[in-house]
Image (spheres, rainbow, N blue to C red):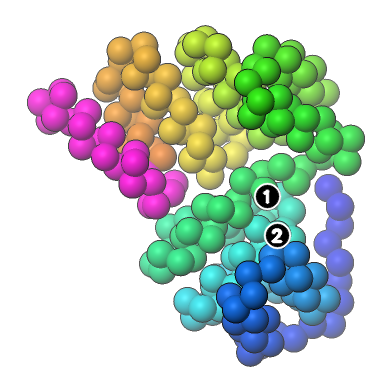
């Protein structure tokens, strides 16, 4: 894990809000990230994500998604349940990037390859490479999640559930694994377990409207 930079930085919100408003106007994430990074450390952004007004929290959470490492995961995870919908959406979009920022640069590069293989439908190759990386870095939650994804796509639902459980043990904010675990239980016709998993996902991420709809459907199917 790379050490965070320590620098003198502004502790008040006006500059961050100014940068955020400029981002909203031009929609250039790279410029926003570069400008925020020149003034704020992740530690200060984390404080703003917890204590600022809703605009400040939105700005800080977006910045953490761009700049924060895995140490920012608890702050981003808490933001998934923020009272403000904009904060929740920013956290939902940014936190998967934070999940990838663990380990060495080489391990991160391998993870990116695994993700690309899954996205391209080369699930057996992803599964094999993920298994190798798990041997080297068993603490890397996102690798377990990607192997769970590969298992799921190959219809190995029991194996996918196992890896999703391990992902959530390592990263309790990983709502994607909770959702996939629910989908796997549905495929195995275990609707009660699926309902439990979907409830768990909603407790992590309040924005999952599709999952909320599945909960309503399953409750009706099970007769409440």
- 94 sits to left or right of 214: right
Relative placement, left or right, of 215 versus 20 is: left
Question: In the image, which is nearer the foreground, mark 2 or mark 1?
Answer: 2
Image quadrant in which you'd find residue 38: bottom right
Q: Earlier in the sequence, mark 2 or mark 1?
A: 2
Q: Where is residue 159 in the image (x, y as percent from the top left)?
A: 54, 12
- Residue located beneath label 1 in the image: 98
Q: Is residue 219 magenta?
A: yes
Q: Provide the secondary structure element on which disc 1 rests.
A: helix
Residue 1 image point, x, y percent: 83, 48
Instruction: Say which residue appears at 66% left-offset and 25% top-offset.
Output: 120
Residue 99 in magenta stretch: no
Q: Which residue is drawn at 71% across and 42% down?
A: 100
Q: How far across and how far down the image is residue 188, in percent?
A: 36, 11
In the rendered image, which residue does mark 2 sit on?
66
Q: What stretch is highlighted in magenta?
A: 202-224
């Amino acid at each position: 894990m790379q050490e965070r930079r320590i620098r003198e930085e502004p502790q008040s919100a006006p500059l961050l809000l100014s940068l955020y408003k400029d981002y909203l106007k031009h929609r250039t994430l790279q410029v926003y990230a570069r400008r925020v990074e020149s003034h704020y450390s992740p530690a200060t952004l984390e404080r703003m994500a917890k204590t600022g007004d809703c605009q400040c929290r939105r700005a800080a959470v977006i910045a953490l998604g761009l700049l924060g490492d895995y140490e920012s995961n608890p702050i981003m995870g808490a933001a998934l349940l923020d009272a403000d919908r904009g904060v929740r959406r920013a956290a939902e979009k940014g936190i998967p990037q934070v999940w990838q920022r663990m380990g060495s640069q080489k391990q991160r590069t391998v993870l990116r390859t695994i993700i690309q293989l899954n996205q391209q439908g080369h699930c057996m190759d992803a599964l094999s490479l993920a298994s190798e990386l798990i041997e080297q870095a068993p603490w890397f939650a996102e690798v377990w999640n990607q192997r769970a994804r590969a298992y799921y796509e190959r219809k190995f639902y029991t194996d996918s559930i196992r890896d999703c459980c391990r992902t959530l043990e390592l990263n309790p904010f990983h709502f994607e694994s909770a959702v996939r675990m629910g989908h796997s239980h549905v495929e195995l016709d275990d609707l009660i377990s699926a309902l439990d998993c979907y409830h768990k996902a909603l407790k992590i991420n309040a924005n999952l409207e599709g999952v909320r709809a599945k909960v309503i459907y399953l409750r009706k199917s099970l007769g409440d």
